[in-house]
Amino acid sequence: MESNVGRGRRGESIAAVWLEERGWELLDRNWRDGPRELDLVARRGGTLAFLEVKARTSDAFGAPLEAIGPRKRRDVERAARAWIRSRGPEVGGVRTLRFDAVSVRLDPSGRHEVVHIEGAWRTGE
């Protein structure tokens, strides 16, 4: 049986490939700021997105995106600020900063469904 961490990493890998296939450039994956983590950081054109990925095999514990509550959003926002400070000029040319969510439904047969919610939340929500 796959652990929660293993399922999460597999979901992040699926999301990363899915985003790259749609023209996103992955800048970072599993970037840490102390106890906080950014699952994926990606850029497409002038948009920089901080993506929180949730993978599930069923809705027994709620839909994947329901797991991104106020505390998780605050942690992602804090980590995003730290990521920007650490990258400095590398984020030049960015016109839009955004917090996105990606839901990955994993099926035992190996199939999956990816849902990307652009602008899933704004800072301070």
Image (tube, grey):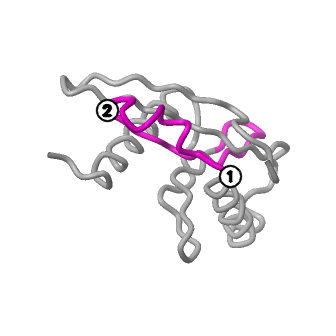
* Circle 2: residue type: Thr
State yes or no: residue 16 in magenta: no
Q: Under tag 2, what secondary structure?
A: loop
Q: Quadrant of residue 95?
A: top right
Magenta residues, start to end: 43-70
- The answer to whether 122 is drawn above or below residue 112 in the figure is below
Name of the residue lying farthest toward the bottom? 34
State yes or no: residue 66 in magenta: yes
Q: Earlier in the sequence, mark 1 or mark 2?
A: 2
- Measuring from the top left, give residue 124's x and y in whole percent: 82, 53
Dot label at residue 70: 1
- Measuring from the top left, give residue 39's x and y in whole percent: 51, 53
- The answer to whether 87 is drawn above or below residue 61 in the figure is below
Q: Under tag 1, what secondary structure?
A: helix
Left or right relative to 1: residue 42: right
Dot label at residue 57: 2
- Measuring from the top left, give residue 7's x and y in whole percent: 30, 45
Name of the residue lying farthest toward the left? 1
Left or right relative to 2: residue 18: right
Give the crowd class for mark 1: few <14, some 14-19, many >=20 residues within 10 Å: few
Q: Quadrant of residue 13?
A: top left
The residue depicted at 24 percent of the width and 52 percent of the height is 3
- Using the image as rendered, state which of residue 95 and residue 109 is in the foreground: 109
The residue depicted at 40 percent of the width and 38 percent of the height is 61
- The answer to whether 64 is drawn above or below residue 93 in the figure is above
